Image (spheres, rainbow, N blue to C red):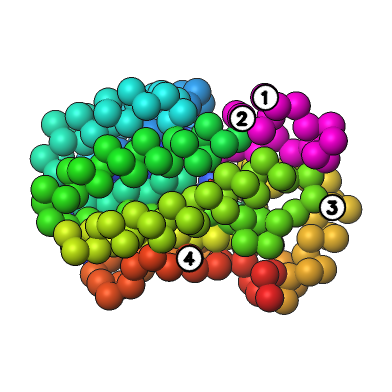
Amino acid sequence: MLKGKSAVITGGVRGIGRAIAEIFCKNGADVLLCYKSNDAAAEKTQDELAHYGTKVEILKGDVADPAFAAEAVAKAKADFGKIDILVNNAGITRDKLMIQMKNDDFDSVVDTNLKGSFYFLKEISSVMIRQRAGSIINLASVVGVKGNPGQVNYAASKAGVIGMTMSAAKELGRRNVRVNAIAPGFIETDMTGVLNDEQKKKMSEVISLGKMGLPEDVANVALFLASDLSGYITAQTICVDGGMSI
Ligand code: NAP
């Protein structure tokens, strides 16, 4: 479905980003996986995805640093010659009730989740404009749509991602560049692994399907949005949440 295409995936070595990287490789894409610090996960993912036979490159850096986006573009262009797909997936949480939240907890989440996505969106969309083709997928969250106590910082960053997605889609549509978002609900990754069983049980009670999602549930939708099957879809946010947000 993605044969001959190339993708940049931020946070592509663990969790949802890794699942997206795997399904992209399985479907014929070359991938550049950006990550912040976990060298072991990056090397393991690179090794594990090699058997699909496409190019799997890794690049270490902080998405909150605008220079990193430029570095990723330069590497992807040198390795693949073009960039067809961007997945803005890198994200963090620093959960606390608002009155206890330090300004730094707010800034670091917005810097990574929102500003980091903007830097990659801006750099890579200029490549896609010249190509007159591209698909950009931003990872939002149901928390950005509905809010959640203890996540004022995270909700602000993800609501920002949704607004940015719609505005960028309006700017880029005439250049044949599509921009969409995925808003996952409660997905089993290291990010949610910090919650205890009681917290997980409580969360599952508000999910219509009664269970947490898997990274692959999100990756399937990313594959659809990256491929030509979604060629007439832009500016949308698709919830992958087992009915949690209704
Ligand atoms: P995860 O398992 O914690 O993995 C996060 C990935 O992002 C890691 O590869 C990490 O790099 C990378 N990363 C974090 N900060 C970075 C930075 N400043 N620069 C570069 N890379 C950075 O997270 P996940 O659960 O898969 O979540 C992926 C995305 O989905 C996030 O945007 C998250 O907000 C969103 N989401 C997740 C859920 C959920 O339930 N899990 C729900 C809604 C939305 P290292 O490996 O080097 O640490």
Cα gap from disc 1 to disc 3, whole angstroms: 25 Å
Give the labeled residue for mark 2. Answer: 107
Tell me if mark 3 has few (under 14), some (14-19) or many (20+) residues whose alpha carbon lies within 10 angstroms of its own. Answer: few
Q: For this rendering, which residue is in front, 102 or 190?
A: 102
Asked whether residue 232 appears in the rendered view, the answer is yes
The residue at label 1 has a CB less than 8 Å from ligand 1: no
Q: Nearer the viewer, mark 1 or mark 4?
A: 1
Which segment did they paint magenta? 90-108
Name the residue located 62 percent from the left edge and 67 percent from the top edge. Answer: 241
Cα gap from disc 4 to disc 2, whole angstroms: 24 Å
Sequence-first disc among 1 and 3: 1
Q: Amino acid at mark 3?
A: Gln
Sequence-first disc among 4 and 2: 2
Question: Mark number for residue 237?
Answer: 4
Sequence-first disc among 4 and 3: 3
Q: Nearer the viewer, mark 4 or mark 3?
A: 4
Q: For this rendering, which residue is in front, 2 or 203?
A: 203
Looking at the rendered structure, the secondary structure element under dot 4 is: strand
Name the residue located 32 percent from the left edge and 31 percent from the top edge. Answer: 69
Give the labeled residue for mark 3. Answer: 199
Tell me if mark 4 has few (under 14), some (14-19) or many (20+) residues whose alpha carbon lies within 10 angstroms of its own. Answer: many
Q: Amino acid at mark 2?
A: Asp
- Left or right of residue 2, residue 111 in this image: right
Question: Mark number for residue 217?
Answer: none
Give the labeled residue for mark 1. Answer: 104
- Left or right of residue 192, residue 64 in this image: left
x, y percent for residue 233: 33, 72
Tell me if mark 2 has few (under 14), some (14-19) or many (20+) residues whose alpha carbon lies within 10 angstroms of its own. Answer: some
Asked whether residue 52 appears in the rendered view, the answer is no
The reply to whether the C-beta atoms of the residues labelled 2 and 1 are less than 8 Å apart is yes
Q: Amino acid at mark 4?
A: Thr
Cα gap from disc 4 to disc 3, whole angstroms: 26 Å
